[in-house]
Image: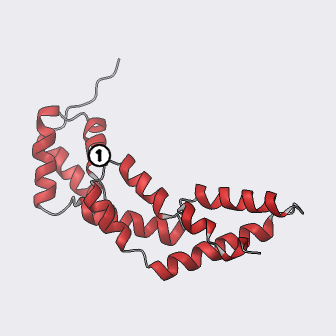
Amino acid sequence: MQYKKQLTKEQALQKLKHYCAYQERCHSEVKEKLYSLGVWKKDHDAIISTLIEENYLNEERFAIAYAGGKWRMKHWGRVRIRYELKQKQVTEYCIKKALKQIDEEEYLQVLHETAAAKYASLKSDQYLVRKKKTMDYLVNRGFEMSLVNSCPVFVK
């Protein structure tokens, strides 16, 4: 049986500074990393508070970066982004602040373009089948049902 070498508090802090400097992280990701490094549980709070004080760890900054990235790269809707941030145990305040960064006009434009592209890609002749599949797709992408219902693609 092989045992992990125990890191000192200073070594762990140094590793986590690199970990946080490389990419924005949330508190839960840092806690998981502490466990994987085999750091004593009693040292976790001190290390995390040092990272926050030295501005390596900032949940608000993480939430804004995460929401912006998922919106720009994957065109996720607000519902999905909110859900994913909640899974990462980000506070409601930070989630709201992050979602405010998404431009409303651009959001609606992407929703309409995505709906039109998906609707056009479906080969079924039946209008209701195409409409249902397109709506399901948009809801799975995280767009609000009220906005999906008012999409111009579905207005006949």
Q: Quadrant of residue 25?
A: bottom left
- Count the numbered circles shown: 1
Report the residue at 80% width, 60% height from top: 128
Instruction: Classify 104 as above or below 42.
Output: below
Quarter of the figure with the C terminus:
bottom right
Compare residues 52 and 156 and report the one nearer the observer: 156
Look at the image and tell me whether residue 8 can be seen.
no
Horizontal side, residue 12 vs residue 99: left or right: left
Across and down, in percent, residue 135 comes to: 67, 60
- Toward the bottom, the furthest residue is 105
Indicate whether 91 appears above or below 153: above
Point 23% across, 50% down: residue: 15
- Which residue position holds label 1? 28
Q: Secondary structure at mark 1?
A: helix
Q: Is residue 9 in view from this perspective?
A: yes
Of residues 91 and 151, the one nearer the viewer is 151
The quarter in which the N terminus is drawn is: top left
Q: Amino acid at mark 1?
A: Ser
Q: Nearer the viewer, residue 46 or 39?
A: 46
Give the residue drawn at x 16%, y 55%. Answer: 51
**Residue ranking furthest to the front:** 156
Here the colouring is secondary structure
Residue 40 locus on image (x, y percent) = 16, 32
Q: Label 1 crowding class (10 Å Cα cut-off): few <14, some 14-19, many 20+? A: some
Residue 98 in picture, x, y percent from top left: 34, 67
Residue ranking furthest to the right: 125
On the rendered structure, is 130 left or right of 75?
A: right
Q: Position of residue 103 (x, y in %)?
A: 43, 79
Residue shown at 87% from the left, 61% from the top: 126
